[in-house]
Amino acid sequence: MRSMKILFNRIVLYLICILIITGSVGVSAAEVTSEKVSNVQKAEMLLKAMGVYSDKKKTSNDNNNEQPESQGTANISKGEFVDLILKTIKYDDKFLAGELEAADDEGYAESLKKAEELKLTDSKDGDKDIKFGEAMKIAIDAMGEEYKQFAELIGGYPTGYYSLAHKTNMKLPSMGFDKSISRSDMLNLIYGLL
């Protein structure tokens, strides 16, 4: 049953991607006319169309006080990464409806709690920068139990996960496992996940 749900979600995501790239979902022609649209731009357009990503970050508890993030240089917190992964994969109806919003700047407590329930990661250090190795592991584990078991079978963390990420054509930045990932690294990683 879970495999069918994952398959259905992937088919829907591929269809959305095709519609975005062709400009049929209201994406302006200027955004898709360039033949050299980067994976980061594709991921950003796709995730925005899905309603799970915004390049704006809350700067206070006031929901109207948002400022655009720097695309390439801003490091991503573990909580923000987990929240986006869960919303992208759509683990439950609350995420689908966007009801699990962060309550504060450090936020993402509900997303981290859900990720811990799903055995993707622990709920600690949600406000700290996520490291590349942990982000890659969370992304692969979120793809399903089969992927997690296969990664463990071919070497475990980190080498088995890294090998599996390459086999699934996940777009991996060239960096050490202990390096913080930037916003564009995150978008690249999630684009490869889809």
Image (spheres, rainbow, N blue to C red):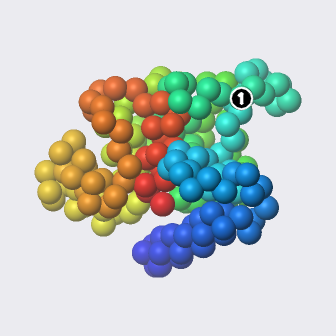
Tally the marks.
1
| Residue 58 placement, left or right of 71 | right
Residue in front for this viewpoint, 68 or 22: 22
Q: Report the amino acid beneath label 1.
A: Pro
Percent position of residue 127, x then y: 53, 24
From what the image shows, is residue 124 above or below residue 166? above
Percent position of residue 36, x then y: 53, 51
Q: Can I make out residue 81 in this image? A: yes
Q: Which residue is mark 1?
A: 68
Residue at the (43%, 31%) spot, across then down? 181
Residue at the (27%, 54%) spot, across then down? 166
| Residue 146 placement, left or right of 12 | left
Q: Can I make out residue 77 in this image? A: no
From what the image shows, is residue 105 above or below residue 95? above
| Residue 63 placement, left or right of 85 | right
- Number of residues whose C-alpha sits closer than 10 Å to that of mark 1, classed few (under 14), some (14–19) or many (20 or more): few
Secondary structure of residue under mark 1:
strand
Residue at the (26%, 60%) spot, across then down? 167
From what the image shows, is residue 189 above or below residue 57? below
In which image quadrant can residue 96 be found?
bottom right
Percent position of residue 177, x then y: 28, 32
Residue at the (66%, 63%) spot, across then down? 20
Percent position of residue 10, x then y: 51, 70
